[in-house]
Amino acid sequence: MDIQLTGTFLIAGLFILSILGMNFQLLETSAMNNMQTMAQDNITEIASILEYDIRKAGYGVPSGTTAILAISDSTIRFLADIDQNGTPDTLNYRLSDTAAPSGTDNPNDRYLYRSVNGTENDVGVGLTALGFEFFDASGAATAVLADIRLIRFEITVQTVFSYNETYGTATWQSQISPKNLEDI
Amino acid sequence: MGRAEMLILLGAIMIYGIFSVSVNDARFKNEYRIIQSQFEILAVAIANSYLEEGKSKEFDEVFTSTPPTTLPDNFTDPASMGTDTGETYPNFDDLDDFNSYSLTDTSSIGFVYTVSISVTYVTTSDFSTASASRTFYKRMDVTVSSPDLTSNIVMSRIYPFIG
């Protein structure tokens, strides 16, 4: 075969392979962008639910009653008259284990469970981390329930499916000093 | 291979090289933006949490005790905005306690950030410029800066006095 023809085929082949490779990379980048957006959409929804409830901690709770009932690194249980019926409700937030969301590809995702007076519902999926920190009026970390004035939480959400084993990830951090905790 | 064909081949390689570099550059910038957006959304969340917290505080220190009758003249002097004696975050009781508040912290994903807050009076005719006199409106500016951000995140909110 003509050496020039062979060379042309080789160069053209390499060129086409490169174009295909770049096209694939662009698709991957586009998919990652979409997944990132999904994770960010999801995390803002979950954060708004958490922020709304935590901000209400102590609301409608009789004076002298400690509104924060139990805390840990990843759970919180507190009193708040969330339905404004004059009776304080008990709210609890916790994460499921990783086995609970069985229909997702992500092996690390969990449900976020919110319970009101013992009735529990999942309010978010895709969470891979939920962390709480608690501070007193002087800004020092505390585990004394009655002293808690500032609650900081950080959540990480991943997409429930991956693209090339990569998940869209978003992290949200918020700190709330519930107004009604000050009056206890 | 003739000289003309060689030149065409070199030209093709050059065009391909430029194309390849441009695409890779675009990919790199895109990846960078993805990482940046992760930090930016975190910075926005942090800034927003302070703005939300401001809503739960009294408009002015004067309302933490018996309110004066002459307003806004009895509000805190613009030059005296900031924490009062014995007040430390989060034990703030009014909005302007946040003035000059600053904090450097690290999130769990290693995002090192500094929060700086300023609170000023503003007027209805110009919400963006600090007023040198007392008014019924205060603006809180929360700036989140970090070596991981290409530019600072600045979020503001106007808090009107609702008597």
Image (tube, rainbow, N blue to C red):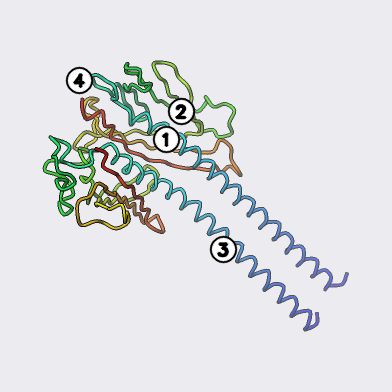
Residue A162 located left or right of residue A142:
right
Q: Are marks 4 and 2 in contact (CB under 8 Å)?
A: no
Read off the chain for label 4. A
Q: Are marks 1 and 3 in contact (CB under 8 Å)?
A: no
Q: Residue at x 53, y 45 (%)?
A: A36
Residue linked to disc 2: A112
Q: Nearer the viewer, residue A30 or A51?
A: A51
Residue B152 located left or right of residue B38:
left
Amino acid at the residue labelled 4: Gly
- Tell me where residue A130 appears, x and y as whole percent: 40, 33
Read off the chain for label 2. A
Which of disc 2 and disc 4 is earlier in sequence?
4
In this rendering, the answer to whether A108 lies above or below B25 is above
Residue linked to disc 1: A48
Amino acid at the residue labelled 2: Leu
Q: Residue at x 47, y 34 (%)?
A: A127
Q: Residue at x 58, y 40 (%)?
A: A162
Q: Nearer the viewer, residue B14 or A115?
A: A115
Is disc 4 surrounded by few (<14), some (14 to 19) or many (20+) residues within 10 Å? few
Residue linked to disc 4: A64
- Tell me where residue B55 appears, x and y as whole percent: 30, 39
Q: Are marks 1 and 4 on the same chain?
A: yes
Is disc 1 surrounded by few (<14), some (14 to 19) or many (20+) residues within 10 Å? few
